[in-house]
Amino acid sequence: MGILSFVITLLLFASMEVASKPLMGSIDPLVLTFWRFVCGAAVLGIVMLIRKKRVDLTFRKVLVLAMMGILNTFLSMSFLQLAVKNTEACRAATIFGSNPVFVVLIAAVIGWEKYTKRKGAGLLLGVAGLILVTGMYTLKIDSGTIYALLASITFALYIILSRKASLNTDPITVNVISFAFGLTALAVWLNASGIPMSPAPLKSEIPSFLFLGIGVSGLGYVAFMVAIRKLGAGNVSTVFLLKPAVATVLAILFLGERITTSFVIGLLLAGAGSYLVAGKIKKSRA
């Protein structure tokens, strides 16, 4: 069950950029993000009710969950969808998948992460990989690449906050509540920006939307939690290391995207860097 959950998580998370790319001609990226997380929150909410876990929340926990929701659902996922619209799906996925590099870099700067030679080597490899993947060496970067970098950085901040918070709360409950805060912030932004929030443009793309909403944003998170319980958080964290490679293969197969030699080298370097900074994988006792 653990391995199956891991594979399902990997395939669902890695397919997000590829599955949503064709929808970018039909609906605003932020509106798509809003509705897919509404579906995801509904799926997780049903799971939470079935499990009947006791919810013990203090004001501090609610505040932390609100910050997590804003960083993840509102900022990071919105930036990622904007990246998908404005650049190749494989590029967006690879840059986003390099968030472990930003986690260590940011945590080290603010003094929350102990710097080691292993992590130093990982940072160098990760940065070198990002330079190749983003095309920084050409001194030309498209808007999609910038959005992908912002998505990776804000997701790194989300990870750092979730690690330091020590909420001791059921993960499904954490996601449901944080999603709610993130969706609220996104709704406020869309209304303030005058962007119509109607999901009507998705009528012709129902299968793809349901896959993104119920599948990726809902069942994907459930499978992720099951995999963590069965295999351990350390082992399951490799999902984010494998996601760029799987997403690239899917983008080539289903979107016909073409990759360059420099992109492949950058992908390998970014993956190696992320692996090194993520730390050694420990076997779970679960």
Image (cartoon, grey):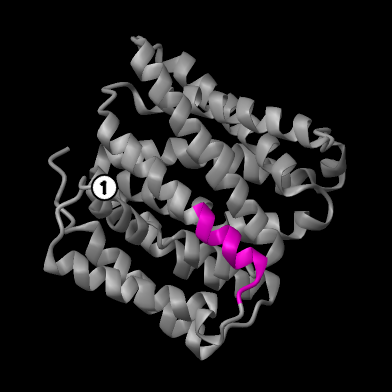
Q: Position of residue 9 (x, y in %)?
A: 44, 49
Q: Residue at x 53, y 21 (%)?
A: 45
- Report the front residue among 126 and 105: 105
Inspect the magenta stretch and tell me whether residue 206 lies in it: no
Residue 8 in sight: no
Left or right relative to 43: residue 52: left
Residue 184 in sight: yes
Q: Quadrant of residue 229?
A: top left
- Report the front residue among 5 and 142: 142
Q: For the C terminus, which image quadrant?
A: top left
**In the image, residue 153 above or below residue 5:** below
Q: Quadrant of residue 193?
A: top right
Going by the picture, which residue comes out furthest to the front?
110
Left or right relative to 104: residue 281: left
Q: Position of residue 267 (x, y in %)?
A: 43, 76
Inspect the magenta stretch and tell me whether residue 142 lies in it: yes
Q: Position of residue 161 (x, y in %)?
A: 34, 37
Q: Secondary structure at mark 1?
A: loop
Q: Residue at x 23, y 54 (%)?
A: 108
Magenta segment main secondary structure: helix
How many dots with numbers? 1
Q: Which residue is mark 1?
A: 110
Left or right relative to 155: residue 2: left
- Report the front residue among 31 and 63: 63
Q: For the N terminus, which image quadrant?
A: top left
Q: Residue at x 77, y 30 (%)?
A: 191
Q: Position of residue 82 (x, y in %)?
A: 67, 55
Magenta segment: 141-151
